[in-house]
Amino acid sequence: MNHNSRPTPEPAAARPTARSVGADEQTRPRPARTPRKKNGGAMLRPLTVIGHRGARGHAPENSLLALDTGIRLGAQYLEFDVQLAAGELWLLHDLTVDRTTRSKGLLSTMSAARIRALRDKSGEPLPTLREALDLIENRAGVNIELKSWGGCAAAVAEVLREYINEGWPAERFQVSSFHHPELWEFHQLMPEVPIGMLVCGVPLSWAGEAAELGASVLSVSAEFVDAQLIADAHARGLQLWVYTVNDRKQLRALRALGVDGVFSDYPERALKA
């Protein structure tokens, strides 16, 4: 991890928020990679590059710095994890804060004051969902992974509705989860926002369960991807996204296979695949 070369976001006080920036003033992300020919002459599909937990290969995961870095590196989407605790949505992957902060304990048991006092290993506070969206300013698509349940879906829907009412296109968001009941609850609350079904392996029904759920995207681990799964997803009108891919050779192989998107800690590598 190269800490010396990572870009530093502007101070929050100097950076305008999404609420104060007009649509024509915002920096738009690059579109999905356009098709190009591979060696045999066939066309490669456009590829969507998703910065995993922002761009955690360059900055602490799920931090504002990681999100800003992902944008600067050209990711079309930024993926991050959210949990509901103490009445607020926080960006955190693990149920405990042990791995990514200087403290220990379950996030769900902490007060809002204690959570706000937490610092990650680089000394930065845990962002809230609103803080993350204000930093992104619609400069990239947003993939929000629901990491807790029992109210998380409803809380995310409430926040996204605010931003959509203020001008963010609904299709610029995608909400995903391994916890499919929570994902279904979100889909019932906000059917206009695309959802992505995350799976650990290959479902017996291939992409059938994702289609029944109403998902736009099926996201699977790279080790389970093959031509049959991709074909089944495409036949059902779904995109097939793959996590988490950092090796350049594997990135090229997956693109040649026909996947639609890749999550990467190093989005600049995927953009060159």
Image (cartoon, rainbow, N blue to C red):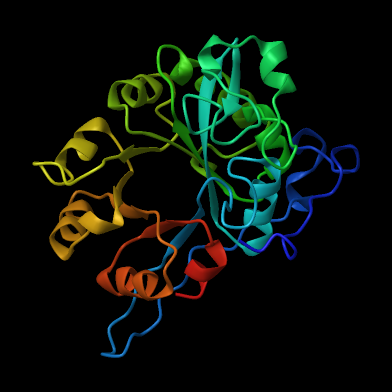
Which picture quadrant has residue 255? bottom left
Q: Nearer the viewer, residue 206 or 108?
A: 108
Q: Position of residue 41 (x, y in %)?
A: 29, 89
**Residue located farthest toward the left when viewing the structure as drawn:** 204
Q: Residue at horizontal 52%, vertical 14%?
A: 108
Residue at 62% x, 55% y is: 70
In the rendered structure, the answer to whether residue 247 lies left or right of residue 267 reads left
Residue 144: image x %, image y %?
A: 49, 36
Tell me where residue 158 sits by quadrant: top right
Question: Which residue corresponds to the image point at 72% horizontal and 41% vertical from the top-left?
Answer: 135
Which image quadrant: the N terminus? bottom right
Q: Quadrant of the C terminus?
A: bottom left
Q: Position of residue 125 (x, y in %)?
A: 72, 31
**What residue is drawn where x is 18% and y is 62%?**
226
Depth order, front residue of 249/156: 249
> Is 162 or 242 nearer to us in this picture?
242
Looking at the image, residue 226 sits to the left or right of residue 82; the answer is left
